[in-house]
Amino acid sequence: MGSLTGLLFAGGLGFMLLAVASGLDFGAPPMLIGTEIQAHAPQQTGAANIVTSVVLGYRAIDTLGELSILFASAVSAGLVLGRRHTTAGTQTKGGFILQSGGSLLFPLMMTIGFYIIFHGHLTPGGGFQGGVILAAAFFLPLLARPGARLHHKSLSLIEGFAGASFILIGLFAMLEGKAFLQPMLIQDTLGQLVSAGTLPLLYLAVGLKVGAELASLLSRLIQTEAPQ
Amino acid sequence: MISAVTPELILHITAIGLIAIGLAGVVLSSHLFRMVLALVIAEAGANLMLVLAGYRWDAVAPILTSRAEPAAMVDPVPQALVLTAIVIGVGIQALAVSILIRIRQRYATLDRKEAAERMDAEIAATLGAPRDISQEAPLGERPLPPLPADQINMRGDSP
């Protein structure tokens, strides 16, 4: 009975969404804000990647809220998991190839992560994607050596510093008489690495915050994994 | 309604199908980890649907490659929304998985009904009450028996 209700619910919801979607004019979205942003974003923010100028320029406060959601989930996961159990030594270490592979990949993944963060205003990518790669770079050696530990204190220091600098950059814009988190220091060098004013700095802060948060979250998960 | 099979129909059916599969999995599955996985599938469908909402025909990704303005670019706003939604999704999944780890450590099972059963039993044992108690009835005895009517009268109007 319960499964029949569930199937009916899922099917009915799918049918409703399909009916709504069939009424949409596919390929010609009715929202005008997208074209407006495309027309004015290069002059107003100086970023070649318009998604970046939406994320960090037009919707920067949303991004701040989203960062705080991520922070809240990381904090509550730490709260749920509590103090980590000492499982070091109970898990078997990875083999030679796994360990050296993890060590070899670490600098390469750091490089790629920072490359993606620094080019977030020019190419597809940015702080969120690069931050996840940074977290993976820190997580890989942990998978190869289960006994190893991440330095939680320095991770939370990086995270707090990055979050504070995101807000501080926004406050500096207010000091200059602009709105909170409004892009500043825009030069007319569209497409250069040093362009788009404060947007790359904001993305660097986002990348460091996301990377540190996810790395500490993953290491906490792996350290509480072993059964008691 | 749609008459022929077009690319847009296939894409919409894919997105909606992912959402429906995910919700059906959340409702139907009895294993908690599978519920989390089904939630992830539903989230992927929702993200795909958001991206589809900003699509334009013959349009490129919203990134300027040269000074000359290209003909058409897809709507950047849904893409920015999805970008943040994916990261939030990862945070939510990590939180859900950590709660699952705790449940498994405490009740040694991830089956939904079994875990709920053991949780009920534990709560009842902590309260010292029988299992199937009423939601409305007070737990245990009343703290004081009600006073007889004459005593109340005596206390009320004695000079």
Image (cartoon, rainbow, N blue to C red):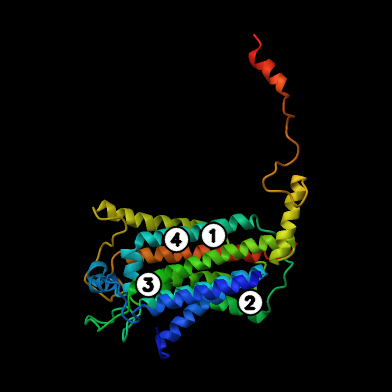
Location of residue A201 in the rendering, given as x and y in whole percent from the top left corner: 35, 64
Residues marked 2 and 4, same chain? yes
Report the chain holding disc 1: A
Q: CA distance from mark 3 to mark 1?
A: 25 Å
Q: Which mark is residue B78?
A: 3
* Mark with earlier residue (2, 4): 4
Does residue A225 sit above or below A103 in this rendering? above
Q: CA distance from mark 1 to mark 2?
A: 28 Å
What secondary structure is marked by label 3? helix
For label 4, count other residues whose C-alpha is less than 10 Å away and answer few (under 14), some (14-19) or many (20+): many
**Number of dots carrying numbers:** 4
Tag 2: residue type?
Answer: Gln
Q: In front: mark 1 or mark 2?
A: 1
**Residue at image x 31%, y 69%?**
A53
Location of residue A68 in the rendering, given as x and y in whole percent from the top left corner: 45, 57
Does residue B129 sit above or below A183 in this rendering? above
Residues marked 4 and 3, same chain? no
**Residue beneath label 1, please?**
A74
In the rendered image, the quadrant that contains the N terminus of chain A is bottom right
The residue at the far top in this view is: B159
Are the residues tagged 4 and 3 within 8 Å (C-beta)? no
Q: CA distance from mark 2 to mark 4?
A: 33 Å
Considering depth in this image, is A16 or A128 the residue closer to the camera?
A: A16
Report the chain holding disc 3: B
Tag 3: residue type?
Answer: Pro
**Residue beneath label 2, please?**
A99
Are the residues tagged 2 and 4 within 8 Å (C-beta)? no
Q: In front: mark 4 or mark 3?
A: 3
Q: Which mark is residue A67?
A: 4
Does residue A28 sit above or below B105 in this rendering? below
